[in-house]
Amino acid sequence: MDIFDIYKTVEYIFSLYSENEKFPTSLPKPFIQEEDTVDLEKYAGKWFEVARFQAPFELFMDNVETNYTDLKKDEDGKNTIKVVNTGKFAGLGVSISFDGTAYSTDSSNKNLKVSFNFNTEKKGDYNIIMLGPVVDEKYSYSVVRGDKYLWILSRTTTLPEKDEIISHLKDNGFSTEKFYFTKHN
């Protein structure tokens, strides 16, 4: 059994939990104003995960980073971007990396689908709902929601606006007590 079989098993087990458990089966529809458009050139680059709703595929992982590169248009004219997620299993120091592709579902580039090389048939939602100000021609932070999960990403391992973002999410119906704060060392 390889690592991907283990993740598939863990994901299946946690998919059995109800939305009231630690691993939600769905998120509330956001009451906050989602971003109108996203400039993927400003979104591309390295991100550090600051916080997340625990996901089976990230269980026991810290030092989580994502790198978005190779922005281009596919044969259907949709924007695509290469995704590389990396992290270390807490306490073990073992690194793992997942390669994938994200593509925009509309011209706003705020709603994307992402799939990873170990399971290209499964495409997860990647909806950018908040963006920080542009610094050095890049967005400074991002809040992303999927069907079941929520992530706060930053260009640095710390995010001064973290408490403000979490408060805003809580005020708009998200169960922010479910956040796991990712460690970086």
Image: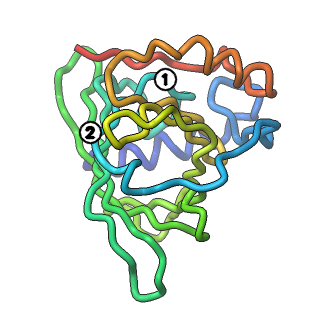
In-front residue for pair 98/102: 102
Q: Residue at x 61, y 47 (%)?
A: 146
The image position of residue 41, as x and y in percent, is 37, 56
Q: Is residue 24 left or right of residue 84?
A: right
In-front residue for pair 110/66: 110
Q: Residue at x 29, y 19 (%)?
A: 90
Q: Which mark is residue 86?
A: 2
The image position of residue 78, as x and y in percent, is 48, 77
Residue 119: name its quadrant.
Answer: bottom left
User: For mark 2, does the 10 Å Cα neighbourhood hold few (<14), some (14 to 19), or many (20 or more) residues?
Assistant: some
Query: Residue 32, relative to residue 4: is it above or below?
Result: above
Task: Identify residue type, mark 2.
Answer: Thr
The local secondary structure at tag 2 comes to strand
Q: Work out whether mark 2 precedes mark 1 in sequence or the reverse, and give the earlier one.
A: 1
Query: Residue 4, relative to residue 94: is it above or below?
Result: below
The image position of residue 155, as x and y in percent, is 34, 30
Q: Is residue 67 left or right of residue 142?
A: left
Q: Which mark is residue 51?
A: 1
Which image quadrant: the C terminus?
top left
Task: Identify residue type, mark 1.
Answer: Ala
The image position of residue 116, as x and y in percent, is 37, 59
